Amino acid sequence: KFAVGGQKLYVRLFQRKLNWLKVNKIEYGEISVDLSPIIEELAKARFLQTESELEDLCEGLDLLLAPELKTLAKIFHLSNPNAQKQQLVEDFLRLAKQRSVFSRSQAGVGTVILKRVKELAGKCVRVCKGPRAVFSRILLLFSLPESVEDEEAGSGGQGQLSTVLMANMGRTVFPSYTVNRITQVFQDRDDLIRYATAAHLSNDIATAMVNGNWDEANNLYLCAKQTWSELKNHPSLSYHRDLPEYLRRFTVGWVYTRILSQGVEILQRLHMYKEAVQELQSLLSQDVYCADSRGRWWDRLALNLHQHLKSTKKAIGCIRRGLADPFVRTGHRLSLYLRALRIRDSPSCKSFRGLIHDLPAITVEDVTHVTINGKMCPQMGMGKSVFLMEDVGDEGGKDCSASTVMCSVEELALTHYRRNGFDQGIHGEGSTFITLYGILMWDIIFMDGIPDVFRNSYQTSPLDLYTDSFYENRRDVIEARLQQLHSASSETLAELIADVWTTQEGKAAALVSWGRFISLQQVQGLVSCLGGMFLSGVFRRLSKDLRHCRGGLPDLVVWSTHTQHFKLVEVKGPNDRLSHKQMLWLSELQKLGAAVEVCHVQAVGGKSKHIS
């Protein structure tokens, strides 16, 4: 058992990336001015490795700062010793592969470089992988990640530990709910290790993809595919299949299925479309794991068959089966249908029109489109468009000095609507409505009585929030709340908002962005304009399928405190188009009685900085 200083230092090093660290760079004055004896104690207990175990040249080079690498580059007469760090590392690794020219018995060049690296680095340490993996698994067991996006199993558990530390310091306060853990997710230690290993692998693949290392990602994917094929008949899998969907996410099969799904993108990037099609067909042939991804798989399959493999007949069959799949929702459903219409209207696909005529129609109402002009700021590189706008003081008038400010398309549009009588406006995209939903449904989201959705004290939402089970498990109370909202007066809505706002503000809840509104009064003013009937319609859609419906809500909500009128606006900059999810939401919101608009911002030249 370590003394308190050892415990504190280990926790801090555990929180950092799994890299070698120079001892003279490790400074934690709150633990001790001299950390050397504590580091020695941790190393002696095999919780830390020392530089004697540093054998990988790449890891050693990574440890050095750029000036140190340049010094080393001059010693070894590299052709460009003043190059960037990454280039120098690559040059050293290339040099290390050469054999020494002096004698067969002499160590290779790589060993000589590593020796010099260690001399430059001085004493260094790294957290031992064995104990670290045990702590990671403990944290994983203690707090299963809530949503797919937050899954940190592959990061080693640092996120979970940070959460606990923030809560213990009082910096993060979680909502009140009852922990009700009944079902055992992992059957034994081996089951947990298999899951954690798969999660780490998925994380490594995602990192390689983000960095554009597609060959490395492909090798990892193929390795995972092989491991999964060997595991498929394991007895634990039948137990996993019987778990509810929101717990099945924490099984080895779910993670490997996600890896195979990542593999589809990797194969497409490498132009291996035939292999991508085979992988998609394999994924769609199973219905146990990742049901919420089936829409994306059908969409990808239709795209690959039609565009890349030029197999139109198979593409139509794929669209037909995709539209019949109950798990294909919202944007993916519309995407499949519109692909069928493009095939139907294509002159080269005349002979296939008979296969399309009886598809179930998906109607999307058209909405109002307006265009405003704005002066674009000349910019370098890609990225979002930046516009120039004259920022006139609130009083206006000709004596007012105006300054030119840079702004986004959304800010430009907000100014346009402000000048057209909408004195209030929020650029929040989906978070404006999602936050209103989180506030007005707070007690239902955190209600008792549903087993296994709250498994520890540090959750920001129930585990089933983004699954069909969320609505099914709470159907009666959700329907009662929607009915209450439907007939609620402005005063009642203001009270419902105030009850939650005054008791819960600042608590960490997944759906609520407390900073989205300036004040409680602003929320109440907006809700009064929107009205209960409209809100209940939006909330019904969110309750039944939050996973697929949280995306695509309009960018802006603008309203007038004088007339109580509101407008929902999707803003599109130059060369920007509506996504399928946005088309569906705009149509749905219009059906619910909202004034809906798509505001296109057109870039103009000239000296004018005004919006017209």
Image (cartoon, helix red, strand yellow):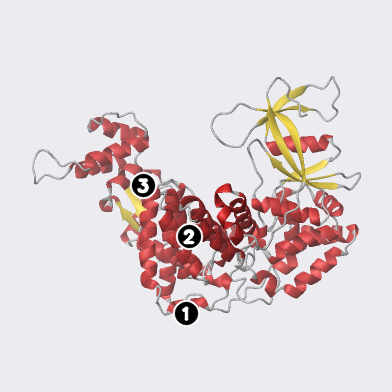
Instruction: Indicate the position of residue 267 as horizontal and vertical percent values.
Output: 42, 53
Quadrant of the rendering where the N terminus is positioned? bottom left
Residue closest to the eye, 54 or 542: 542
- Residues marked 3 and 1 touching at CB (< 8 Å): no
Q: Nearer the viewer, mark 2 or mark 1?
A: 2
Q: Earlier in the sequence, mark 2 or mark 1?
A: 1
**Residue under label 2:** 261
Q: Earlier in the sequence, mark 2 or mark 3?
A: 3
- Residue 531 found in image quarter: bottom right
Q: Residue at x 29, y 32 (%)?
A: 71
**Residue under label 3:** 23
Q: Secondary structure at mark 1?
A: helix
Q: Earlier in the sequence, mark 3 or mark 1?
A: 3
Disc 2 marks which amino acid? Ser
Instruction: Indicate the position of residue 443 as horizontal and vertical percent values.
Output: 74, 67
- Residue 383 found in image quarter: top right
Disc 3 marks which amino acid? Val
Residue closest to the eye, 469 or 186: 469
Residue closest to the eye, 92 or 286: 286
Residue 510 makes an appearance in the image: no
CA gap between label 3 and label 1 equals 49 Å
Residue closest to the eye, 200 or 141: 200
Q: Secondary structure at mark 2?
A: helix
CA gap between label 2 and label 1 equals 22 Å
**Residue under label 1:** 238
The vertical placement of 527 against 229, above or below, is: above
The vertical placement of 572 against 481, above or below, is: above
Q: Secondary structure at mark 3?
A: helix
Q: Is residue 213 left or right of residue 555?
A: left
CA gap between label 2 and label 3 equals 42 Å
Instruction: Indicate the position of residue 81 as horizontal and vertical percent values.
Output: 30, 29
Disc 1 marks which amino acid? Ser
